[in-house]
Amino acid sequence: LGPITAHRVGVEGSVSGNTLTAKPSSLSPGSLYKTVLSSTNIKDVSNNSLEQEYIWYFTTIYDSSEENTVIGSDGITKVVIPEGALTADGYVAINIDPVSSATLATPAELEQARGAALTTEDPYVFPINSTMKEFVVYTGSNTIFGDALLNKRCTVYLPYPDADNDRFVDGTYPPVNQENLVLYYFNTGTKRWIAADNINIDRNSKVISASVSRLSILVLMGRMNPGLKDAYAYPVPFM
């Protein structure tokens, strides 16, 4: 979500049997709310308090006529959705580990797409699984848009690992230089990875941003380095 502003919301509550129904007085669109059942303030008919405190979180649907920002649970992955980009009010869920469990593709489909990427002539074009993130667009009625085509481009932000600051993505072989990273999105129709354009690299934060026209499963891949800035000219002893 966007910038976090904390405020309390009045709630009208009623109890029927062991069910508590709470009706907030007003909710803002595209906002994260926290619901707390205090273990001290709620008691049963015998004046016994709850054994523990219960906490729930929920998000209201976004107003598509306004800009919305959604941030993943890692605090880094995010998407900025401009006003009018979505065809209707809804919400976006970010899955930071679609390799384990994705909504828009099965493990077999992702493996098929990986195999297709590995058949290219560039040995660096392979999905870097540690960077894979899934952006699922839902309507207000909780229906999945799928491979969502947007009315306007959104800006997505994907982090990449480089703990030793050597400019190469950790865990890649052949080693992928951060300068050669490209963002791809998964086309749910063709089951293939498609390269995005308008890539920007924040080398300090180790985050790739890109302007995309679709929200789906996104991943970073490498590409062959066409330049010579990392080349070293070795002396030739026999000349």
Image: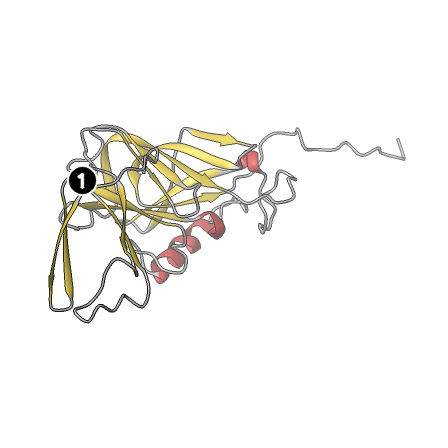
Above or below: residue 32 compared with residue 20: above
Q: Residue at x 36, y 61 (%)?
A: 107
* Left or right side of 202 for 24: left
Q: Position of residue 198 (x, y in %)?
A: 41, 28
Q: How is the image coloured?
A: secondary structure
Q: Position of residue 179 (x, y in %)?
A: 56, 33
Q: Residue at x 43, y 33 (%)?
A: 209
**Residue furthest toward the right?**
238
Quadrant of residue 71 in the image? top left
Residue toward you, 85 or 75? 75
Residue type at tag 1: Leu
Q: Which image quarter is the C terminus in?
A: top right
* Left or right side of 62 for 191: right
**Residue furthest toward the bottom?**
46
Q: Tag 1's secondary structure?
A: loop
Q: Which image quarter is the N terminus in?
A: top left
Residue toward you, 143 or 70? 70
Q: Position of residue 2 (x, y in %)?
A: 32, 34
Residue named by callout 1: 27
Q: Position of residue 56 (x, y in %)?
A: 28, 55
* Left or right side of 44 for 237: right
Q: Residue at x 33, y 56 (%)?
A: 102
* Numbered disc total: 1
* Left or right side of 75 for 5: left
Residue toward you, 138 or 216? 138
Task: Please rate how many residues cluster around mark 1, counting C-alpha atoms within 10 Å: few if below 14, some from 14 to 19, many from 20.
Answer: few
